[in-house]
Image: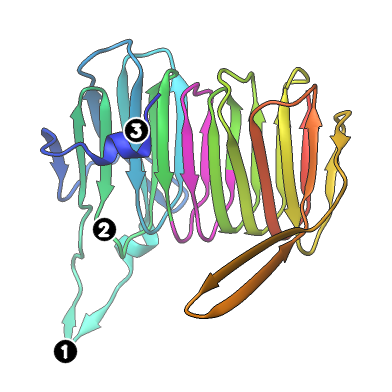
Amino acid sequence: MYTLKRYKSMKNLKLIMAILFMGIATGISGQEKSIDLFTIPLSSPGNEGLLEVEQVRGSITVNAYEGKEVIVKVSVDEDEVKTTKTKAGLKRIGGSGLNISAEEKNNIVQIENEAWNKKTDFDIKVPANFSLKLSTVNEGDIYVKGVTGSLEISNVNGHITLDNVSGSVTTNTTNGEVKVSFDRIANQDNMAFSSFNGDVEVTFPSSLKANIKAKSEMGDVYTDFNMVVSDNKPQVDTSKSSGKYKVKIEQWVRGTINGGGPEMLFKTFNGDILIKSR
């Protein structure tokens, strides 16, 4: 399993390709231009890997496939490319291009998009046994399908959808829904699913063994599991610092499924929580 600490310690990665500008379109659909960026070979094909993508504007889609490389495509908004502008009596004939780089070492692939003013939608294929760390901020959703590794997914103004996954999951979004569907549970790790403004819906295999901790400030918690619910007592935290005494009271729904197991945390402020079985 790859952890955040492990890949943050990776330095001096081998730069395999940097795209400063790409003008070759493989297909045009509506107002978007689709661009084949690159295919990234892995140091150890067939072994577990990790993909990290961070960007400011746009969606990220990752699908598992049967190949042994990481394939990266992007779509850019044609309206942003073609918009006619003038400045000081001069006509605009071009603008900033893409600025995307990819690095790979020991099956760890890092993709960085520095074109912060351009909406860029990534479409990436990875081998199924990959872990993912994905984040975006504006004008985009994150969608993942079929991977079996650990997932750390973050969004600010968009939805998170994980379909048919199997590894441990940590998700967080501010303005959007979280929807996760597990094909199976491949490990016994704790997991967390949270949103500030949106529903949190997670579907597990009926054989799930877990300790549940859930809270919604402005919504409700639902499940079709036969969950043994603990006494719903407020949790009181006290602390002393700088001569001050602080008390914090939080009320969570707690319970166990199939005798208990790793902790599954569900949290939203404005939305419902749905814990479903399949």
Pointers 3 and 2 in contact (CB under 8 A)?
no
Above or below for 59 versus 44: below
Query: What segment is highlighted magenta in the picture?
Result: 137-160
Crowding at dot 3, Cα within 10 Å, few <14 / some 14-19 / many 20+, comes out as: many
Q: CA distance from mark 1 to mark 3?
A: 44 Å
Q: Position of residue 171 (x, y in %)?
A: 55, 44
Q: Mark 1 or mark 2: which comes first in sequence?
A: 1
Check disc 1 and report its element: helix, strand or loop. Answer: loop
Extreme bottom residue here?
Answer: 88
Q: Looking at the rendering, which quadrant does residue 223 occupy?
A: top right
Q: Which residue is mark 1?
A: 88
Q: Which residue is mark 2?
A: 115
- Asked if one can make out residue 26 in the rendered structure from this viewpoint, the answer is no
The amino acid beneath tag 1 is Ala
The amino acid beneath tag 2 is Ala
Q: Position of residue 133 (x, y in %)?
A: 40, 39
Check disc 2 and report its element: helix, strand or loop. Answer: loop
Q: Residue at x 33, y 23 (%)?
A: 49
Disc 1 versus disc 3: nearer the observer: 3
The amino acid beneath tag 3 is Leu
Q: Residue at x 21, y 22 (%)?
A: 106
Side (left or right) of 30 relative to 104:
right
Above or below for 196 versus 221: below
Q: How many marks?
A: 3
Q: Which mark is residue 51?
A: 3
